[in-house]
Amino acid sequence: MQKSGGYFIMKRNLFCTKCFNDEDFEKTTGTITHEIKNEKFEENVEKFICKNCGEEIIEDEDFDESLLKAFNDYRKSHNLLLPEEIKKIRSTYALSQRALARLLGWGQVTIHRYENGSLQDNAHDQMLSFIKQPDNMLKLLEKNKKNISTKLYKKTKEKAETLLLKKSLTDNIIIKKLQSLNKKYSGNKKFDIEKFYNMVIFFSQNIEKLWKTKLLKLIFYSEFINYKKFNTSIAGTPFIHWPHGPVPKRIYALLDILIEDYKAIEMQDISDHYEGSIIINKKDFNPSVFSKEELETLNLVLNKFKNYSSKELCNQTHKEVAYLQTKHNDFISYDYANEIKI
């Protein structure tokens, strides 16, 4: 049994310490005031009134819950991170509680305590807010490199670099323009560079000597077939009408992003029987970014067109209503997806 602010708190069965009643209580709601660093915070709480003498009783778990609410109200009034925000920062970098504590040079249980409601001090809060930004995490990694294992350093650095890349791509003006297009040109989905990149990797890993022209047609069929089946595209890729068939809008800029920013592919120019560029992948395919249905569509397109030459696939797209009903540089509406011949 405890007493706080004039209220008795019972751990299990209700019991009035004033009159020793343990049977007759009335459940009600009221408030309790907690004092945190000389500031008072009033919280709603469930109470039990002893019908024999009028004593107010608050159970342990209700008291603890009200105290956590008071801590959070304190955090909000002082612009401190909430426990769930601290957990999100940690999970963003895929770190355990102990791994993050080691990286920051704190006690092993510090992060555990903060995530479970203990109030952090200002210095710790500022550091946690600082590493929310991946470029700051990279600075911390270099500073504390000697204090952590090589495995933890490499893993966290790779994650931070990936997040930094995503942030820079989110700010990329070309991607922003593609994401702002009417949904009928993106298949009811905002353009997703991560999925587009992994579509490229998927086909380049599964097709030997993949020509760029063939790749673009495979992406076209993947997007439009998925829309036909599920009323949504895979990556939200907008297409325009070009002489050799449908191609993604701003395709050269997108390929530059995959080459220069993601460092995911290379393009090798070939002058042989057929002149053009082949795609060479430098990173592994990540199936986790796709749904089960999207993976089925990708495999359907792969199995259907894997052995087609670039010319055969171009000729196939030229027969599609989506191509026949549009002119050079026109956007191709996903409304034509129902007419796809596959």
Image (tube, rainbow, N blue to C red):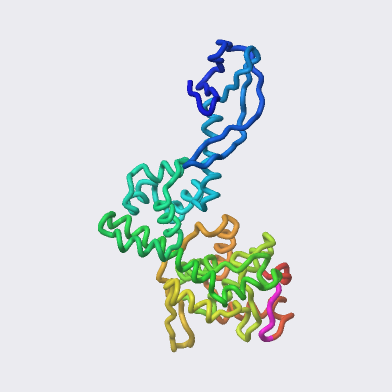
Judge from the rendering whether residue 225 lies leftward or rightward of residue 91; answer left or right.
right
Residue drawn 52% across the image and 38% down it: 68
277 to 336, vertically: above or below: below
Report whether residue 309 is seen: no
Quadrant including the C terminus: bottom right
Judge from the rendering whether residue 11 lies leftward or rightward of residue 340; answer left or right.
left
Report whether residue 182 is seen: yes
Query: Which residue is nearer to you in this view: 22 or 111?
Result: 22
Judge from the rendering whether residue 154 lies leftward or rightward of residue 78; answer left or right.
left
Does the stretch in magenta take in 339? no
Residue 216 position, x and y percent, is 56, 76
Number of numbered discs: 0
Residue 4 position, x and y percent, is 51, 27
Query: Which residue is nearer to you in this view: 173 or 69?
Result: 69
Judge from the rendering whether residue 102 lies leftward or rightward of residue 286; answer left or right.
left
Residue drawn 36% across the image and 42% down it: 109
Magenta-colored span = 328-334
Residue drawn 68% across the image and 70% down it: 341
